[in-house]
Image (cartoon, rainbow, N blue to C red):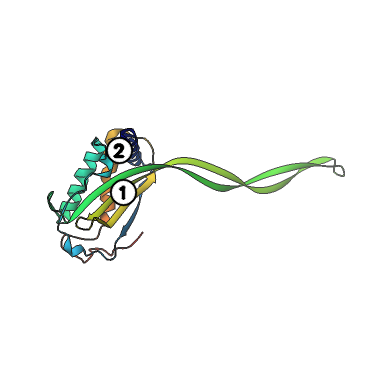
Amino acid sequence: MTKSHRILRWLLAVCAIALLAGCATGPTIRTDYDPEADFSRYRTWAFYQPIAMEETGYTTFLTDRIKANVRREMDARGYRYDEKSPDLRVNFQGIVREKTDVWSVPRTDFQYFYSYRRRAYFAVPFWYDETQVSQYREGTLTVDLVDSARNRLVWTGDAIGRVTRKPPEERAQDVDRAISEIYLRFPYRAGSNEPVVPAKKQ
């Protein structure tokens, strides 16, 4: 992959996070996990190298904000940061897609006919479905937890939503909420294989 292609991928990923941060409504959270993973083995963590959002070597205020949020959430669950030999590595990425919604709206209209017998026009109603099309952007922010020894994904969470543009301060606050909501679905604490809340695929 050429440097220009890597930069283009990075710019698209940053745009995805920026747009997701401007979601008009709260994002949908989806999670999945490896049912064979033994979460009692995991006590330490570090960031994956390279972070998917930083493959070109660039950082932004949003990627730094995400890192700070991930540190807070991992610390709150008892995981200790260990850059040299972590049990888990945390990766994150963002993408944006053009989406199209198509739906039908019931409509009523009238046709007018002339009655020679009554010497007047009269209306006859008829009903039909009108097709509506809406194009929009959908952003996805993904957080992955990877077993460091096996380089195997053991848990993943997505925040997905329609996106709008907002000032940088509001986007940063929305990123905070998105990371918090993703981690609300992560059920484990350091060194424990017993979920705090039932883990389920969504």
**Label 2, residues with CA under 10 Å away: few <14, some 14-19, many ≥20:** many
Q: Residue at x 26, y 40 (%)?
A: 55
Task: Pick whichever, 193 or 47, lies toward us.
Answer: 47
Q: CA distance from mark 2 to mark 1?
A: 16 Å
Q: Residue furthest front?
A: 1
Q: Of the residues shown, which amino acid type is indicated by label 1?
A: Thr
Q: Which residue is label 2 attached to?
A: 171
Residue drawn at x 73%, y 43% is 111
Q: Amino acid at mark 2?
A: Arg
Residue 144 picture location, percent across and down: 27, 52
- Looking at the image, residue 96 lies above or below residue 39: above
Q: Position of residue 134 (x, y in %)?
A: 50, 41
The local secondary structure at tag 2 comes to helix
Quadrant in which the N terminus is drawn:
top left
Q: Residue at x 35, y 40 (%)?
A: 16
Q: Residue at x 25, y 50 (%)?
A: 180
User: Looking at the picture, how far across and down is residue 102, in whole percent?
Assistant: 53, 46
Q: Earlier in the sequence, mark 2 or mark 1?
A: 1
Q: Residue 150, which numbered label? A: none
Residue 173, image x, y percentages: 27, 40
Tell me, yes or no, if residue 185 can be seen here: no
Residue 41 placement: quadrant: bottom left
Mark 1 neighbour class, 10 Å CA radius: few under 14, some 14 to 19, many 20 or more: many
Against 69, is 59 above or below? Answer: above
Tell me the mark number nearer the camera, choosing from 2 and 1: 1
List the residue tagged with mark 1. Answer: 142
Mark 1: secondary structure = strand
Above or below for 90 versus 8: below
Quarter of the image holding residue 20? top left
